[in-house]
Image (cartoon, helix red, strand yellow):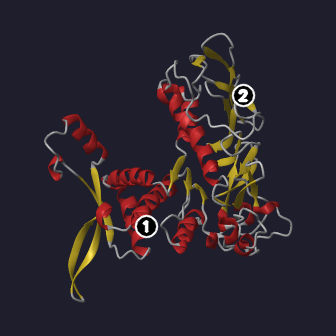
Amino acid sequence: MIIEFSYQNFRSFRDATTFLMKADAGKSKLDNTFIVEFNTGNSIQLLKTAVIYGANASGKSNFIRAFFALTFLIKNSAKFNIDQNQLITYEPYELDIHTINAPISFKIAFILKDIKYEFEIAYNKNRITYEKLNFSPKGQVSNIYTRIISEKENYDTIELGKNLLDKKINKKVFKNQLYLSKFGIETPHDELTPIFQYLSNINIWNAYDKFSISDLSKEIATSIAQPENKILKDRLSKLIRVSDTRIESIGSKELKKDNFKFPEEIPENVINDFLRANRFQTFAIHKLFDGKKEIGKTEFDFDRKESVGTQVLLALGGKILQTLENGGILVIDELDNSLHPKLCKFLIRLFNSKISNPKNAQLIFATHEVTLLDHDVFRKDQIWFVQKDKHGNSELYNAGDFEGIRDSTNFEVWYRTGKFGGNPEIKEIEFIYE
């Protein structure tokens, strides 16, 4: 579970920014929180969901992209060639001459197997400039490893902490690679590989990006086609059915080459790549009528015959149900895209419910939909806002920071009337046509 995520000098965020999933001392909506007991006897109360609001171009999506940049480097940097000239996730704040070439930094605090970990990195255009992994197995912070920066060699060295049990590992890493990344790609390790897996498995999706939704739909189609995932398929069918789509159930089937008509001039390797990418097809079962009389069922190709909103529901709903079943963290940009607000609230409540979220999975999402600002859905510590200052710098702040705010406050009214900020300041019509 995530406790805290901090970053600095990333895209529109110039200053040090901290996002928390730690609950405040409030006693309302305790189902929206959960308690983790550490092996030391101490405990921490965390939130199951958090929402981020802000005007267009305020920085909401950049907040989501910060998660993506960190996890991308963890998942992929061990594959970077030594001669790779630029880290593609290096996107600093470019409206200040002091930051335009400065390092980007990330820090994430999380809990894995009831132990708290902290992972910190910094990097510039060409190399990793800082990397450290700490944990607190006995309550006190202890270092697992620290990166030692070399100014002369084309690689850095690693200093291992005293509490790392298996020290028979390579202690060198190329300058453009994260050391942690090596333990999910080339070097198995009983202590470090689970940390790599945990952080790299943070799921990040953009509901507004049709390519992202298409990729996610293919992933869900592959999952529900497997017999061992029958429970997921049945729950997804129920979710789509209760969403008033008039779909009775959904399924997925494997397609063969004969199911497609390829022009003769297309090379075989291109055909094979296409078949691998489109191996499974999702279908929807609808009732078939003769006038008003139901006479059977009929099958629809999900991608060709269902609405965009229903396709988004299949993709996001499938991923949400997977996350609830397995545990973990799901981060979504534009959750409300093509989905009715009531349906969005329902999906959020799936995370806040003890029945549907027994493993305490966490959902973090950005949205414009103000009707989700319902005090029956959120506590004040679950609500965040992003707003740009006069320098174009994005600032992230929590609803709980405001004086007079309570968990019973009408959050939507406060937001609509500008008490929280985060709303666009739109000039009058005359400004455009003067």
- Counting every numbered tag in the picture gives 2
Q: Nearer the viewer, residue 305 or 256?
A: 305
Side (left or right) of 50 relative to 274: right
Answer few, some or many: residues within 10 Å of disc 1's Cα (few below 14, many 20 plus, some between 14 and 19). Answer: some
Q: Residue furthest bottom?
A: 292
Q: Find the distance from the CA under tag 2 to the CA under tag 1.
A: 47 Å
User: At 78% across and 59% down in the image, what residue appears?
Assistant: 24
Label 2: element kind: strand
Locate residue 185, reporting x and y percent. 48, 28
Side (left or right) of 220 relative to 105: left
User: At 32% across and 61% down in the image, what residue appears?
Assistant: 303
Mark carried by residue 121? none
Asked if residue 235 can be seen in this view, the reply is: no
Tag 1 residue:
309
First in residue order: circle 2 vs circle 1: 2
Q: In the picture, which quadrant includes the C terminus? A: bottom right
Q: Is residue 310 above or below residue 153?
A: below
Instruction: Specify the quadrant of the image occupied by residue 15.
Output: top right
Q: Of the residues shown, which amino acid type is indicated by label 1?
A: Gly
Q: Of the residues shown, which amino acid type is indicated by label 2?
A: Asn
Tag 2 residue:
143
Locate residue 146, reporting x and y percent. 69, 24
Proximity of marks 2 and 1: CB atoms separated by less than 8 Å: no
Side (left or right) of 173 relative to 4: left
